[in-house]
Amino acid sequence: MKKLALVLGLISAALMVSPAYSQSAKPLPAGEYVTKAGLAQLFPGTFMARFKKYKVRFTASRNGKITGKYRLFSDKGSWWLRDRKLCIKLSSWFKGKTKCSYVIKYGPVYVAKDVVFSKL
């Protein structure tokens, strides 16, 4: 239950800072799982991701490489699609572990595990 509240809070925060979101009160859009074909259209690209209190800019290239920048910190790694999941492995962040997750689209934002992101 705590995880659901955290995800819904992150989605709400991301929607409020999204340029596509108007300031009028709107109901939370229904989420939909992004298909493998949808992920292939979404990636590669540049994204703004929110994880806890951090706002990180990620750039994913066609060759499967990904870089993340948060203020003066950065990390590099790889991304790939496995079945219908997005997988990311960074050298230092996430302790070098691979993170794979289904991606759910809520209006202009996407949710993957505890990360909310939007394409720039």
Image (cartoon, helix red, strand yellow):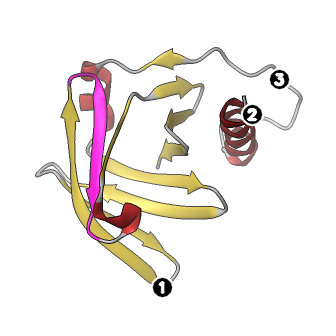
**Picture disc at residue 72:** 1
Task: Judge the density around disc 3: few (<14), some (14-19), many (≥20) Cα neighbours within 10 Å.
Answer: few
The quarter of the picture where residue 7 lies is: top right
Say left or right for 15 vs 60.
right
Among numbered discs 2 and 1, the one appearing first in the sequence: 2
Q: Is residue 89 magenta?
A: yes
What residue is rendered at 39% in x and 61% in y?
94
What's the distance in space between the residues labelled 3 and 1, CA to CA?
A: 36 Å
Q: Looking at the rendering, in which quadrant would you find the N terminus? A: top right
The quarter of the picture where residue 93 lies is: bottom left
Height in image: 39 above or below 88? above
Percent position (x, y) of residue 89? 26, 55
| Residue type highlighted by circle 2 | Ala
What's the distance in space between the residues labelled 2 and 3, CA to CA?
A: 18 Å
Q: Which residue is mark 3?
A: 26
Percent position (x, y) of residue 9? 75, 39
| Residue type highlighted by circle 3 | Lys
Q: Which residue is mark 2?
A: 5
